[in-house]
Amino acid sequence: MDVYINFPADTHVREIAESILQDFDLHWFPDYFDAEVQIIKDRYMLGNRTKMIQTISAGVDHIDVAGIPNKIILCSNAGAYSISVAEHTFALILAHAKNIIENDSLMKSGTFKQSPTTLLYGKTLGIVGYGGIGRRVAEIAKAFGMKIVAYTRSGADDNVDRLTDDVAELFASSDMIVLSIPLTDKTRGMINYKILQKTKKNAFIVNVARADIVLKSDMLRFLKENPDRWYLSDVWWDEPNIKDADLQNLILSPHVAGGMSGEIMDLAFRLAFENVKNFFDGHPKNVVKKEEYTMKSERFLGI
């Protein structure tokens, strides 16, 4: 059982790998080895013996999925960053609901101006994509006393008050909407002007998934026409080249919801290495449906 780790790794990462994959023959970048399993961040090097590719990232839209033969299993690291992304989701929600950014700016300029804030309690939170991130978001939302509507193909748990198979209906019935769905051929551009128009007055949309799930021109038009609706996003189109982001009803962060700290990455590495064990044991998790990824994202700056 041999594994090639196809990215630069420091001593700490190697120690994590060796503690989990104790009985495996490990090979490290840049010394390529034609191993049965390859662990990657973005690029892969197929060999004659390659059976499985494991990503460190949760998303795989930045990988050339179409170039991987059917006989080779591709596994994502879905769920590895759920805690961090869910916490960031509520950082964005609370920043807007409690006017944190505006009030901070006013106070620092010497202006004492009190304004109404929004209560999360009793509000309906619509979650588009109920995987690891969506489930963690729902768990936190319940602590605030929120009601949950979910759009998902992976099933729900007890935190969901209602399931829907209609994204437009979810937008129409939710006070706040969180996008946490993977970017695939099917989800690319799924949030368009027609769906955005369904939102309630004073609703806000939070995107902690991928920018291209939303049509840029449609979102910008919608925000300009509806200054009471807000877009809170950790992702932006064509990042790191940030353009057209000068609207007042925007709160943005630079694709950091997954976290940049060592403690978060330690968990991600552990889960990826453990899934390699799962593969050799015959039950790998997060197996990617490769037929849904014929298009490849050119930029990838997060997880």
Image (tube, grey):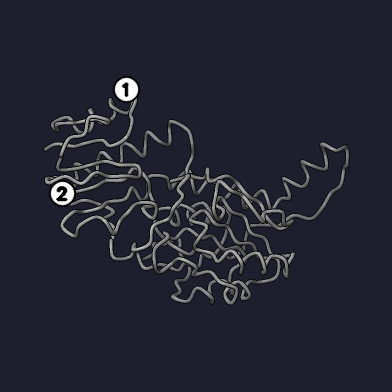
Instruction: Please report the residue visible at 36 percent of the width from the left and 53 percent of the height from the top.
Output: 60
Does residue 40 appear left or right of residue 110 in this picture?
A: left
Cβ–Cβ below 8 Å for labels 1 and 2? no
Task: Tell me the quarter of the picture where residue 24 sits.
Answer: top left
Which image quarter holds the N terminus? top left
Q: Nearer the viewer, mark 1 or mark 2?
A: 2
| Rendered location of residue 224, percent (x, y) | 72, 66
Residue depicted at 47% across the width and 53% down the height: 139
Q: Which residue is mark 2?
A: 51
| Residue for point 77% across, 47% down | 102
Write down the quadrant of residue 297 in the picture: bottom left
Name the secondary structure under disc 1: helix
Q: In this orientation, which residue lies closer to the viewer: 58 or 68?
A: 68
Query: Eyeballing the image, is 225 above or below 179?
Result: below
Image x and y of residue 200, in percent: 66, 71
- Classify mark 1: residues with Cα within 10 Å, few (<14), some (14-19) or many (20+): few
Mark 2 secondary-structure assignment: loop
**Given the image, on which type of amino acid does mark 2 rest?**
Lys
The 10 Å Cα crowd at callout 2, few under 14, some 14 to 19, many 20 or more, is some
Vertical side of 29 occupied by 255: above or below = below
As rendered, which of 274 and 159 lies closer to the eye? Answer: 274
**Residue drawn at the location 32% of the way across and 54% of the way down:** 64
Which disc, if any, is residue 282?
none
The residue at which mark 1 appears reads as 11
Q: CA distance from mark 1 to mark 2?
A: 26 Å
* Residue farthest along the top direction in this orientation: 11
In the image, 82 versus 182, the foreground residue is 182
Q: In the depicted view, which residue is nearer to us: 210 or 241?
A: 241
What percent of the width, then of the height, locates residue 197? 63, 75
Q: Position of residue 142 (x, y in %)?
A: 52, 56
